[in-house]
Amino acid sequence: MKVDGTHYRTIWPDPDGRRVIILDQTLFPHRFETVALETVDEAAHAIRAMLVRGAPLIGATAAYGVALALRDDPSDQCLSRAIINLSGTRPTAINLRWALDRMQLRLAPLTPAERAAAAWREAATICDEDVAINAAIGDNGLPIIEGIAGKKGGAPVNILTHCNAGWLATVDWGTATAPIYKAHDKGIAVHVWVDETRPRNQGAFLTAWELGRHGVPHTVIVDNAGGHLMQHGRVDMVIVGTDRTTARGDVCNKIGTYLKALAARDNGVPFYVALPTPTIDWTVDDGVAGIPIEDRSGDEVRRIAGLAADGQVAAVDLLPPGSAAANPAFDVTPARLVTALITERGVVPATAEGVARLRPDV
Amino acid sequence: MKVDGTHYRTIWPDPDGRRVIILDQTLFPHRFETVALETVDEAAHAIRAMLVRGAPLIGATAAYGVALALRDDPSDQCLSRAIINLSGTRPTAINLRWALDRMQLRLAPLTPAERAAAAWREAATICDEDVAINAAIGDNGLPIIEGIAGKKGGAPVNILTHCNAGWLATVDWGTATAPIYKAHDKGIAVHVWVDETRPRNQGAFLTAWELGRHGVPHTVIVDNAGGHLMQHGRVDMVIVGTDRTTARGDVCNKIGTYLKALAARDNGVPFYVALPTPTIDWTVDDGVAGIPIEDRSGDEVRRIAGLAADGQVAAVDLLPPGSAAANPAFDVTPARLVTALITERGVVPATAEGVARLRPDV
């Protein structure tokens, strides 16, 4: 999407053919800087230190990491080493494993002389496919926004979102944001309520940043505010992303998503979840019982970083000495609270029957 | 309640008979300091600058402010000036108005020679009455916690609370915390999930501090986490306070309370609201339609203060430049989501019939 008028992806090969450029997302929202990755170790560091984050972008970065490794040494050993190195960077990221398996499968059968060029091509293809999937999610979600806009007679469609399922988490477009960008780019008036999304503030730090740079009107709110806004008719729809969707349509997403789904149901506000179908977990039905939730460090609750008066990014402590903090990172929104799933293959109800229409073999 | 073994109220007359001592709550949770108020202007400043906060404590501070004014000049003019001065400090605080009206009514008929002593006595009585009301709320709520404890065979009763309806908001005991302190002091195992309560973090800054200092086991969580904990049976009950309760039992409390009530209902977790009956607003039935919600400055969302690495309290910015922030301060939880109201006059259902039993004339 655009950053103050210039179109960017979150990752792209440098025209010099030797490097890969990313955005340093650890600096958002206070600074916008690109970083050139020259080696596989730099790519691994970018993933581990979360300069890049979001499952699709992590996969794309890993794929380019393999290409960087093979650029100067296309041997079998180098390929194996690169894949082992990269696969240890974020152990739980499914897209990372998937992208590396795909690179391995594509490159191992080739002669070393063919590998480097093929690796760059395959990484580019992985990126282009991600962009195409997200653009399709946008195209499929667009009519929902258009439908609401049609009833509002030109007044902005108010869309609430939680966390960052935006273009910064993907190669472009994002998932939850794709229909919003498509609507905005088409001239439909939209306004986004951005949950700040404690404790890591991805809403405030990333979603607000990317919406602002692309020119989409938005307002940041604390995570507590959405229910009140819905009670007063100030939210027309909710769109969120998901890390994992079960075969019956339960949705595992950033902690707090479930509370917004409850408020949406209580106030008759439609609650949509945008996802690429490859993230559906066909092995789980009941998400609350079946999806283990990561307990992250309480330090993420205890301490927060922001821009200090001296213009530097600084962290401050928020808790009394001696108080414990717990930090479950995700929650599960039961399918009964989800109006529909917006995917690259179409919009389906969040039911076992609806999700079954998205099976790869259908 | 206790601070590391020593019993405190939030306000008390200095034994020198000339000053009033308060805790500087703006320094919580990072520093614990008492402040001596010597003049009515200092009392007014303490209220205006939020060294004291919470409706009952604001009322008590105003009452003592009148006493400070009359100590050296018990004239009619001085009494009037003091009341005008104090009543402008927090225009929307109903307790402030109530306490000042009460001081005026009690003191105006007296001769100037009698006034100073009567003012100190009346302020002390206002404080003692607040303590007695909150202690009674605690006694009435205690059996609810005991009942759950009885079913848990010694395992801690997990109680979630939002914002600070603790002793720091009152003279002692608090409202929502009173049953918790009563249970803890009686040896019943309790554990409190403390919502940090963005944007002003009263949960993290005040509730966690006071529970910790009194020795009550507790864990701070982000406001997003409560629904997930309830889904997994890790919350036995919710107790919150309220700023205003309608005649049918709708509850206006800190923003985000409504979301917790929805999650409690969805998971069969009882949701209690603790309140002194004088805060019931008999003129309103439908809280969502009838209670105007204060929109506070977006700067409270944009900026947060905490303890910096150098040991100083510092504020950091959290939003991208150019992003707007909205900040509704309260929301309304409909009575249908409230299990019961815990008051100094007993526990009643949150229905028009239940609340009617609490009418002053009953």
Image: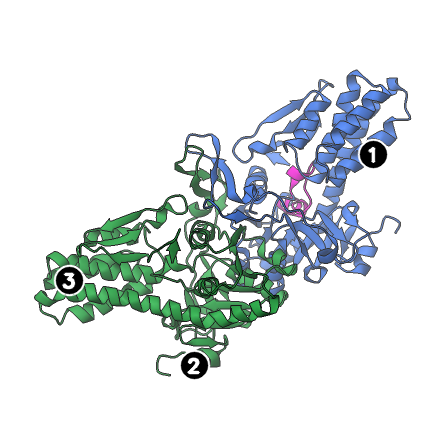
Chain colours: A green, B blue
Q: Position of residue A336 (x, y in %)?
A: 55, 72
User: Is disc 2 surrounded by few (<14), some (14 to 19) or many (20+) residues within 10 Å?
Assistant: some
Look at label 2 and name its amino acid.
Arg
- Relative horizontal placement of residue A337, taking residue A123 as reference (left or right): right
Mark 1 in CB contact with mark 2 (< 8 angstroms): no
Q: Is residue A360 above or below residue A197?
A: below
User: Is disc 1 surrounded by few (<14), some (14 to 19) or many (20+) residues within 10 Å?
Assistant: some
Chain ID of residue with mark 1: B
Q: Earlier in the sequence, mark 3 or mark 2?
A: 3
Q: Is residue B139 above or below residue B49?
A: below
What residue is shown with label 2? A357
B171 falls in the magenta region: yes
Q: Secondary structure at mark 1?
A: helix
In 3D space, how far apart are the residues under numbered discs 1 and 2 (Cα atoms)? Answer: 69 Å
The magenta region covers B166-184
Q: Position of residue A218 (x, y in %)?
A: 51, 54
Q: Position of residue A60 (x, y in %)?
A: 28, 61
Residue toward you, B279 or B186: B279
What residue is shown with label 3? A79
Q: Position of residue B315 (x, y in %)?
A: 49, 36
Residue toward you, A231 or B1: A231
What residue is shown with label 1? B101
Q: Secondary structure at mark 2?
A: loop
In 3D space, how far apart are the residues under numbered discs 1 and 3 (Cα atoms)? Answer: 81 Å
Q: Secondary structure at mark 3?
A: helix
B54 falls in the magenta region: no
| Residue A100 visible, this orientation | no
Choose top left, top right, bottom left or bottom right for residue A230. Answer: bottom right
